[in-house]
Each structure stands twice: as C-alpha cells, then as structure tokens.
C-alpha cells in the first residue's frame, strides 16, 4: 500500500505539475493571442484609416474636378452671353451713329471735329480724311478751313474724320468708329455684366 500511495503521490505530482504547466501554457497562449489580436486590430484600423483617407482624397479630387469643369463651362456660357449682349448693344449703337450721320447735325459735328484736329496740330498743313460718303461735306469744310486738304479714307465705316499733319508723322483719329470702339472697355467695366472667377 505504501507503494500504491507513492505511485498515487507521484501521479498526483505529475498531474499537478502538468496542470500548472497547462495553466501556464494556457495563460501564455492567451497572452500571445491577445497580443496578436491587438496587433491585428491595430493593423486593420491603420489599414481602414488609410483606405478611408485615400478614398476621401479621391472623392474630393473627383468632386473638385467636376466642380471646376462645371464652373469653367458656366463661365464660358456667361462670357458668350455677355459678348452677345455687348455685340447687340454696340450694333444698335452703330446703327444710331449711322442714323446720326444722315441727320442735319452731322455736318456741324464734322466741322467741330475738323476744328479740334486742326487745333491739335497747331495749325499748318493738315490733311483731313473722310469716309467716301462724307466727301460731299468737303467743299463746306474747305471753305471753313482753307489750309486743310481733304482725302477719302475707306477704313472709316461709320463717320467722322481723321487728321494727318503735313509730315505724315502724326495721325489724330476723331472718327465715330474709334469713339465707339473706345467705349467697349468702358461698357465691360460699367455695364454690370460682371463675371466672377470664384
């Protein structure tokens, strides 16, 4: 019986030792699994964060591109519309100026314009250029300004006159054409047809 007791004691000792080792291995395994799980969770979180950042940046980039394209298209349409309005406005203004050149006040306008041009040159020999249709006013202007000579200029489309000094080094353009053209910049700035680049 002593023998049996020793064997039982030995088996109990081995069993207790095995249980302790199993508990230690279980605890160590649990620690390793816990650490692995934490590492995997951290890696998954980093991966998810990276994916979200990448996807968000891609979405923002695509949205920005679409907004830019849409804004550019809108600006293009607005510019086209503004140009249509300006063209129609200046076409109507040109018609009114052409109507003015057919009226009674036009001869007085030409005479005053000739006086301004001749005065700007300080007298002397000046050639006044008129559109072909206005050469009929030449005789009256010759009488008013005997030192001036008159010539046709088919580049003048609406009316008015230009002046060249005798040395042909300076040209003064007092045509209705150039006056109308000079108003285009003013029209863009003051018409209220602003185009914001925002």
Image (cartoon, rainbow, N blue to C red):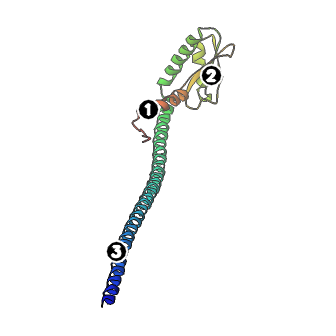
Of the two numbered discs 2 and 3 on the same chain, state the one appearing first in sequence: 3
| Residue that sits furthest to the front in the current view | 2
Q: Residue 173: where, in percent of width, then height?
A: 58, 22
181 lies above or below 40 = above
- Can you identify the residue that label 1 sits on? 189
The N terminus lies in quadrant: bottom left
Q: Residues within 10 Å of mark 3 (few under 14, many from 20)?
A: few
The secondary structure type at the circle numbered 1 is helix
- Can you identify the residue that label 3 sits on? 20
Alpha-carbon distance for marks 2 and 1?
32 Å
Q: Residue 129: where, in percent of width, then height?
A: 62, 22
Residue 137 visible, this orientation? no
Q: Residue 183: where, in percent of width, then height?
A: 48, 29
The secondary structure type at the circle numbered 2 is strand
Q: Residue at x 67, y 16 (%)?
A: 169
Total marks shown come to 3
Q: Toward the viewer: 186 or 9?
A: 9
70 lies above or below 95 = below
Alpha-carbon distance for marks 3 and 1?
92 Å
Q: Residue at x 43, y 56 (%)?
A: 53
């Amino acid at each position: 019986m002593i023998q049996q007791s020793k064997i039982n004691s030995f088996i109990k000792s081995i069993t207790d030792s095995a249980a302790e080792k199993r508990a230690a291995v279980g605890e160590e395994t649990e620690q390793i699994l816990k650490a692995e799980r934490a590492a995997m969770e951290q890696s998954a979180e980093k991966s998810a964060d990276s994916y979200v950042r990448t996807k968000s940046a891609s979405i923002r980039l695509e949205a920005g591109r679409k907004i830019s394209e849409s804004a550019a298209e809108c600006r293009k349409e607005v510019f086209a519309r503004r140009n249509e309005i300006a063209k129609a406005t200046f076409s109507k203004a040109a018609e009114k100026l052409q109507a003015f050149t057919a009226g009674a006040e036009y001869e007085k306008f030409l005479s005053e314009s000739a006086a301004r041009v001749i005065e700007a040159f300080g007298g002397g020999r000046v050639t006044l250029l008129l559109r072909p249709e206005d050469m009929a006013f030449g005789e009256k202007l010759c009488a008013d300004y005997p030192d001036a000579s008159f010539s046709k200029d088919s580049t003048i489309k609406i009316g008015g006159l230009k002046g060249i000094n005798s040395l042909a080094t300076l040209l003064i353009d007092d045509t209705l054409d150039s006056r109308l053209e000079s108003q285009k910049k003013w029209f863009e700035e003051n018409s209220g047809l602003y185009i914001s680049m925002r």
